[in-house]
Image (cartoon, helix red, strand yellow):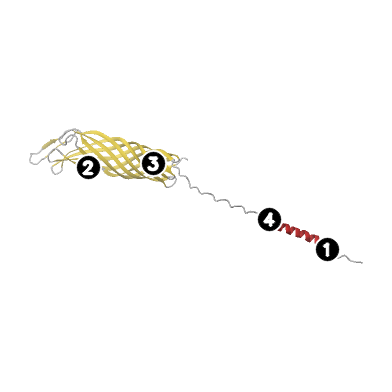
Amino acid sequence: MRRPSPHPGPRLCSGLLVGCVIVASLAATAASAADLPVPAAAPPVAYHPPIYDWTGIYVGGHVGGGWMNDTVTTLATTALQPTGTVTKVAPMGVLGGAQAGFNVEFAPVVVGFEGTWTATSLTGSQQIASLIALNGQQSTDAMPWLATATGRIGYAANDLLFYVKGGGAWARVEYTQTVTIGGGTLLTQQTLTDNRTGFVVGGGFEYGMNENLSIKIEYDYLGFGAKNYTFNNLSGTSNIAGNPPPHDIPVGAFPFSVKSQLQMLTAGVNYRFTWR
């Protein structure tokens, strides 16, 4: 009796055939995948620098220098000077103070309002010839403080703001007339104080160092027009060589006008409180 073969040929061949088909299919799939286009890499996100916003309420301080140009004109002939005598007095000094205001930006336009108060050391004197023999005369002008209230409009180039301003100005002034005799001995002196009202125009630029802090440079011109005054107490007693003492020199009323202008250049810093 014949025994069956231990290696059935047909089954082995069919299994081998199935395996070959599977391998061929996988190879074809891999080849197709290799032929597919590689997806393009996503483009890098473009960098946009933050836009600086000038809107907000701010407070700050400023310091700088100023120079005045006062034109003093006599309005009547007196024992000291004839009518129409003009004297130029040019006080100079340092100044410093505080400012506060607000900005609203409608990019790139910035509008706002600012108020300032400034203390100064502005003072100056000018020696004047006198009609009275052996006499000397001196005019001294000073401005202890000033204040302004202005509107501002500017152009913002991101964190750099160029602006102009204009409005009202107020100043405390002191006018002193001193009469001396002989070698400079004081004969008489009088000081008048007043509050002058005028206008201010100016401009500058401001740089935003960060969201809240900025620094600025500014030029301002202040005009106070002309105003009339009268020294009523310029009279005194002194000893004059060749005359028995005492010798009275009555000066009487001394009417005059003062046309006053001021220019100043300041550097400042502001801290802004933003609301948007």
Disc 3 element? strand
Amino acid type at circle 4 is: Ser
**Mark 1 residue crowding within 10 angstroms, few (<14) / some (14–19) / many (20+):** few
Q: Earlier in the sequence, mark 2 or mark 1?
A: 1
Name which residue lies at 22% across and 40% down.
88
- Reading the image, the residue beneath label 4 is 32
Amino acid type at circle 2 is: Ser
Q: Could you say where residue 123 lies in the image, as x and y percent from the top left?
A: 25, 42
Q: Earlier in the sequence, mark 3 or mark 2?
A: 2
- Reading the image, the residue beneath label 1 is 9
**Mark 3 residue crowding within 10 angstroms, few (<14) / some (14–19) / many (20+):** some
Amino acid type at circle 3 is: Tyr
Snapshot quadrant of residue 168: top left
| Along the viewing direction, whichever of 268 and 26 lies nearer the viewer | 26
Snapshot quadrant of residue 55: top left
Q: Are marks 2 and 1 in contact (CB under 8 Å)?
A: no
Q: Are marks 1 and 3 in contact (CB under 8 Å)?
A: no
- Reading the image, the residue beneath label 3 is 163
Q: CA distance from mark 1 to mark 3?
A: 100 Å
Q: CA distance from mark 4 to mark 1?
A: 35 Å
- Reading the image, the residue beneath label 2 is 125
Q: Earlier in the sequence, mark 1 or mark 3?
A: 1
Determine whether 215 is above or below 167 in the image: below
Snapshot quadrant of residue 133: top left
Disc 2 element? strand
Q: Earlier in the sequence, mark 4 or mark 1?
A: 1
Disc 1 element? helix
Which numbered mark, 4 or 2, is in the foreground of this view? Answer: 4
Which numbered mark, 4 or 3, is in the foreground of this view? Answer: 4
| Along the viewing direction, whichever of 172 and 12 lies nearer the viewer | 12
**Circle count:** 4
Q: Is residue 271 left or right of residue 258?
A: right
